[in-house]
Image (spheres, rainbow, N blue to C red):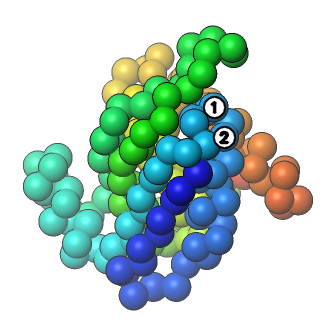
Amino acid sequence: MAIDVNNESGIDIDERAVLDVARYALARMRIHPLSELSMIVVDADAMEQLHIQWMDLPGPTDVMSFPMDELRPPAKDDEEPPQGLLGDIVLCPEVAKKQGEEAPTGHSMDEELQLLTVHGVLHLLGYDHEEADERAEMFGLQAAIIDGWRAEQGLTGPSPAPTVR
């Protein structure tokens, strides 16, 4: 899996963990191992510009996903996944830090960025959370992926609760 992380935010993040959780999520979703993903970490001003440009919403947001080849997980276990460009995930550590602090369980900016990475991957794969049933499916899958990755990493304690709006 080719994943590039470009941190333009000026804030130090745990890039290794973001890469690892993205790889784990894509493997768990059975995305072709030669597919490509780009991740960009930006400051609040840049994220606000993207949020206005693409969503017509004011203020910075936590994560945005821009799919390219609209890859989807294979429908059947024996189906070969297609290879391609997944697209871009844009993360904002300033928003992630605030959300992590405000979360019911309280967690770090890096834990929030890991959660947002999985959230962004799922959006690239066509998942959404506009409707109640979609939200239940996406957030359930997101929790399962984060929990599985944390267990694989030997991390203890509660997993970050979803803070994504």
Give left or right: position of 146 versus 18. right
Identity of the amino acid at label 2? Ala
User: Separation of disc 2 and disc 1 at Cα?
Assistant: 5 Å
Q: Position of residue 165 (x, y in %)?
A: 39, 45
- Does dot 2 land on a helix, a strand or a loop? helix
Q: Which residue is mark 2?
A: 27
* Residue placed most toward the observer, 164 or 125: 125
Q: Position of residue 65 (x, y in %)?
A: 35, 48
**Which residue: 41% across, 59% down?**
38
Q: Mark 1: few, some, or many residues within 10 Å (few <14, many ≥20)?
A: some
| CB contact under 8 Å: marks 2 and 1 | yes
Mark carried by residue 60: none
Give left or right: position of 80 versus 135. right
Mark carried by residue 30: 1
Identity of the amino acid at label 1? Arg
- Does dot 1 land on a helix, a strand or a loop? loop
The reply to whether residue 107 is in sight is no
* Residue placed most toward the observer, 73 or 150: 73
Q: Can you say whether 44 is above or below 34 in the image?
A: below
Q: Quadrant of residue 18?
A: bottom right
The reply to whether residue 144 is in sight is yes
